[in-house]
Image: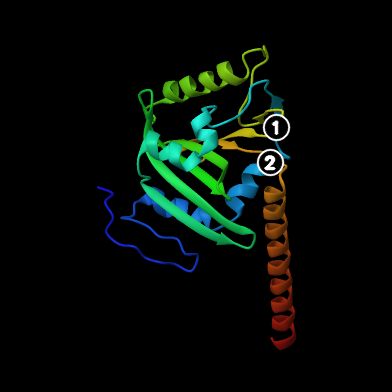
Amino acid sequence: MFGKISKLWRNNKSYYYQRDYYYDQLLSKSENLKLYTSLTNLDGKQAVLTNKVISFSENLEFKRNQHKYLKKKFGKPTYTITNDLPFGKIIIKLFRVYIGTFKTKLELHFFQDTLIMYSYTFSYLKNEFDKGQLLNVLKEKYLNDREEEIDFNKNYIVDQNNSVIVLSDSVDFTIYFITDIKSDLFHQMNELVTNDLALKRQRVSQNERELYRRL
């Protein structure tokens, strides 16, 4: 179904295979740094500390060579996207995998051959019970020593290395795992987005002044 039918180069040097709706969404989001800044700017949420380490894998083979480990475990990615950004390239690999009985889309985002973010998107949940099952597993694994109720709409999980777990349920239910949100990389991303917004506001203001003068 997802066999290679063409290799088309875009301005950002992304290449792609036969496209589907999810891929189009991923490509559109990944070209915009707001994908990352919206997940790392957590001022509106309350942090909940876990004593667990948030990590994709503790396997020594994964730590030695992440790409080789993924190929061995999952095979060839369904899609690969490479984005050229001012500070370097981010490579995104998408795999379609099963976690238990749940069919999910696994995204892995790499910068300088290091995993900076990964996520699981559950597009095929049948009901609220399925979602509740996933939430209960997260709470049991990362927050099993806490008695108070956790609301993932208001809270996020953070470990001692500043890695976080953030949930999104706007379209599909997605669990994001982000490595060290206080790193220089995410700081650069936030600065670029902030400067871009300021430039856009300046252009709008200049345009309005020109319209006011001419009309």
Q: Nearer the viewer, residue 103 or 111?
A: 111
Q: CA distance from mark 1 to mark 2?
A: 9 Å
Tell me residue 127's x, y (percent). Answer: 40, 26
Position of 137 compared to 163: left or right?
A: left
Tell me residue 30's x, y (percent). Answer: 52, 54
Is label 1 in a helix, a strand or a loop? loop
In front: label 1 or label 2: 1
Tell me residue 181's x, y (percent). Answer: 68, 41
Q: Nearer the viewer, residue 68 or 78?
A: 68
At label 1, the amino acid type is Asn
Colour scheme: rainbow
Position of 163 compared to 59: left or right?
A: right
Q: Quadrant of residue 7?
A: bottom left
Q: Earlier in the sequence, mark 1 or mark 2?
A: 1
At label 2, the amino acid type is Ile
- What residue did someone put label 1 on? 161
Q: Nearer the viewer, residue 14 or 214?
A: 14
Residue drawn 44% across and 36% down?
69
Position of 51 compared to 97: left or right?
A: right
Q: Residue furthest left?
A: 1
- What residue did someone put label 2 on? 181
Residue count near mark 2 (Cα–Cα under 10 Å), binned few <14, some 14–19, many ≥20: many
The vertical placement of 44 against 7, above or below, is: above
Locate the C terminus by quadrant.
Answer: bottom right
The vertical placement of 12 against 133, above or below, is: below
Q: Do the numbered discs 1 and 2 sit on residues whose CB atoms are within 8 Å?
A: no
Is label 2 in a helix, a strand or a loop? loop
Residue drawn 34% across and 51% down?
20
The vertical placement of 28 against 104, above or below, is: below
